[in-house]
Amino acid sequence: MNLTLKIWRQKNAKAPGKFVTYKVENISPDTSFLEMLDILNNDLIHKGEDPVVFDHDCREGICGMCSLHINGFAHGPDTEITTCQLHMRKFKDGDTITIEPWRSHAFPVIKDLAVDRSAFDKILQAGGFISVNTGGVPDANSIPIPKADADESMDAAACIGCGACVATCKNGSAMLFVAARVSSLAKLPQGRVEGARRAKAMVAKMDELGFGACTNTGACEAQCPKGISIAHIARLNREFLSAKLKD
């Protein structure tokens, strides 16, 4: 496959960026998208040019690092996959592929296609954890949890924090990410103790960091690589309102 790549190049968050066109040739359809970028970077290095900077880590669809907007889609034109799981067979020989970083006020560009997503870490530090003193660790089977609740908690916990929901949302909202973190704990007895404090603290931190509001368009769910449901946003709203009413 021979392809034309229009890639966003930007030195840092304050520098102006622009699209730069590159050609890649003889790419196997079985090559992953990130491997294709590796091939491009290898060519650029041999030419004495700066390689394209992009985030990646495990390349197994778990870490959430591979944050690329490809032809207008978060993680590319396939459903419920990360960029590292996208293969070139999804494209056609001769295609032009446009590659951009996540676009969000809360995710400033570090360089080229890499963005700073530490805002997610700050939201988690605000309340995405269990800190209550529960004594010794009980046996897992000693705490009865309905299977439906356990399944729903695990579905929410599947969120990898990649930021596709924010990049896809027209408002740059982090509600799906926050809702998944809150919901994964709200459905378990261990998480209920701090439920009210958690919802208020995480929503407050999300607002402080400049994320937009949710208007329930559903775009976040449609392009989430793990298929996180916007039903979790409804639970977050209930948790938050309940906590405020108690205050």
Image: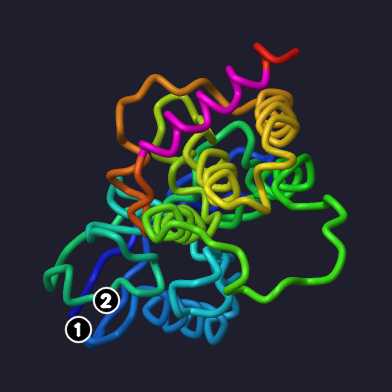
* Quarter-of-image position of residue 127: top right
Q: Residues within 10 Å of mark 1 (few under 14, many from 20)?
A: some
What kind of residue is marked 1? Pro
Percent x, y of residue 159: 49, 56
For the record, the magenta segment spans: 230-243
Residue found 60% across the figure and 49% down from its top:
185
Percent x, y of residue 191: 66, 48
Does the magenta portion include 241?
yes
Residue found 45% across the figure and 33% down from its top:
233
Q: Nearer the viewer, residue 83 or 146?
A: 146
Check disc 2 and report its element: helix, strand or loop.
Answer: loop
Q: Nearer the viewer, residue 13 or 108?
A: 108
Identify the mark nearer the N-term, 2 or 1: 1
Q: Mark 2 and 1 residues: CB-CB less than 8 Å, in contact? A: yes
- The residue beneath circle 1 is 29
- Give how far apart the Cα atoms at labels 2 and 1 are: 7 Å
Q: Quadrant of the N terminus?
A: bottom left
101 vs 78, left or right, is: right
- The residue beneath circle 2 is 87
Q: Residues within 10 Å of mark 2 (few under 14, many from 20)?
A: some
Q: Nearer the viewer, residue 125 or 78?
A: 125
Does the magenta portion include 78?
no
- Vertical comparison of 161 with 247: above or below: below
Q: Which mark is residue 105?
A: none
